[in-house]
Amino acid sequence: MYPTSLELVTFGVGYQSSLGGIRRFGYWVECAFQHVAIFLAFIVALWWCNRPLGVLALAGVVAGAACAWGDFVLDRSVPLGEDDRQAIYLAFAHYGFGAGSETLVLKKTEMGEYLAVDKRHAPAPMEDDPGFDSVA
């Protein structure tokens, strides 16, 4: 909900030391789902115990998420692990929900590691695909 506070919430409590670069991205790929599930389970439990308070909390979460994520734009020029919003987006979009047929490759440069779309391994369109243009 508040990606700018993730450093404090996730790494500030002392269970996990603060990570950087590709290790931080790897942490989010591995643990983002659990963090979100625990948070949503708390909201559901709050709603179960006290419905008006749970609905109010849910409305606050939705409003906060809209404010926090409304201006998000994926910028592939930022190295992995430098921006938590991008790391969480990539964790959910490409690893959690399988964002389509893109094959992602890790590119390492002197500036850091990046995810790039590998165009060499893009799947060929199917004939029954509405976007397929057959040449006769």
Image (cartoon, rainbow, N blue to C red):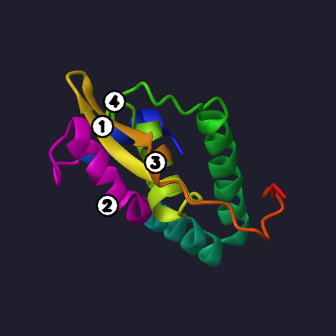
Pick whichever of labels 3 and 1 is earlier in the sequence.
Answer: 1
The secondary structure that most of the magenta stretch takes on is helix
Q: Quadrant of residue 130?
A: bottom right
Mark 4 touches mark 2? (CB < 8 Å): no
The magenta stretch spans residue 93: no
Q: Gap between marks 3 and 1, in whole Å?
A: 15 Å
Camera-side residue: 102 or 89?
Answer: 102
Which mark is drawn over residue 30? Answer: 2
The amino acid type, in three-letter code, at marker 4 is Pro
Which residue lies most toward the top here? 111
Which residue lies most toward the front here? 136
Residue 63: x and y in percent read: 69, 43
Q: Write down the region rendered in magenta.
A: 12-35
Pick whichever of labels 3 and 2 is earlier in the sequence.
Answer: 2
Which mark is drawn over residue 120? Answer: 3
Q: Gap between marks 1 and 2, in whole Å?
A: 20 Å
Residue receiving disc 1: 107
Image-based side of 84 in relation to 7, left or right? right
Pick whichever of labels 1 and 4 is earlier in the sequence.
Answer: 4
Q: Gap between marks 3 and 2, in whole Å?
A: 27 Å
The amino acid type, in three-letter code, at marker 1 is Lys
